[in-house]
Amino acid sequence: MCRGVRKCAEAYRNVQRRTEMCRGVQIRAEAYRYVQRRTDTSRGVQIRAEAYRYVHRRTDTCSDAQIRAQTHRYALRRTRTSCQRTKNVQKTQQRRTVNALKT
């Protein structure tokens, strides 16, 4: 635990959100166990369905570095901006992603 850590956790239905503040580092994690969206319109039918069993989103902000990871089943998308601490943050993010996939 770091000094000055502020945690805010909300758990409702299948959604968990957590925010941690530690030495200017902000981490926001959202875990959705099951999400399904569907849109049906008749006459020129438009159907949009999204179903994924586990989604994990995490945003780490560390000076200039911003990491956003999304895990949809087995797919992984990442967006990064580099800074001096990118390598350390990158290794940490990989560990977090592996742990998220294990759960």
Image (cartoon, grey):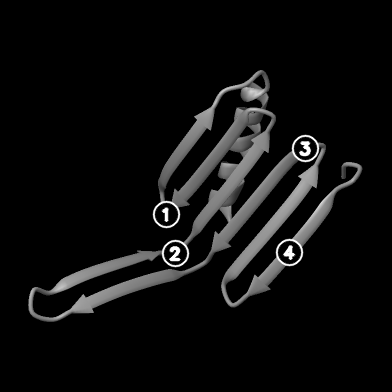
Q: Is residue 66 above or below residue 49?
A: above
Q: Could you tell me residue 95's position as x and y percent?
A: 62, 38
Classed neighbour count for the residue bearing mark 1: other residues with Cα under 10 Å, few (<14), some (14–19), many (≥20): few
Identify the image quadrant of the C terminus. Answer: bottom right
What amino acid type should be assigned to the residue bearing mark 2? Answer: Arg
* Label 2 to label 3: alpha-carbon separation: 32 Å
Q: Nearer the viewer, residue 32 or 3?
A: 3
| Residue annotated with mark 3 | 24
Image point 47% across, 69% down: which residue?
34
Contact between marks 1 and 4 (CB within 8 A): the answer is no
What amino acid type should be assigned to the residue bearing mark 1? Answer: Arg
Q: Could you tell me residue 66's position as x and y percent?
A: 59, 35
| Residue annotated with mark 1 | 73
* Label 1 to label 2: alpha-carbon separation: 7 Å
| Residue annotated with mark 4 | 9
Mark 3 vs 1, N-terminal side: 3
* Element at label 1: loop
Task: Name the residue at the left extreme.
Answer: 43
Mark 2 vs 4, N-terminal side: 4
Image point 12% across, 74% down: which residue?
45
Horizontal placement of 57 versus 40: left or right? right
Image point 83% across, 53% down: which residue?
6
Image point 57% across, 23% down: which residue?
82
What amino acid type should be assigned to the residue bearing mark 4? Answer: Ala
* Label 2 to label 4: alpha-carbon separation: 21 Å
Contact between marks 1 and 2 (CB within 8 A): the answer is yes
| Residue annotated with mark 2 | 53
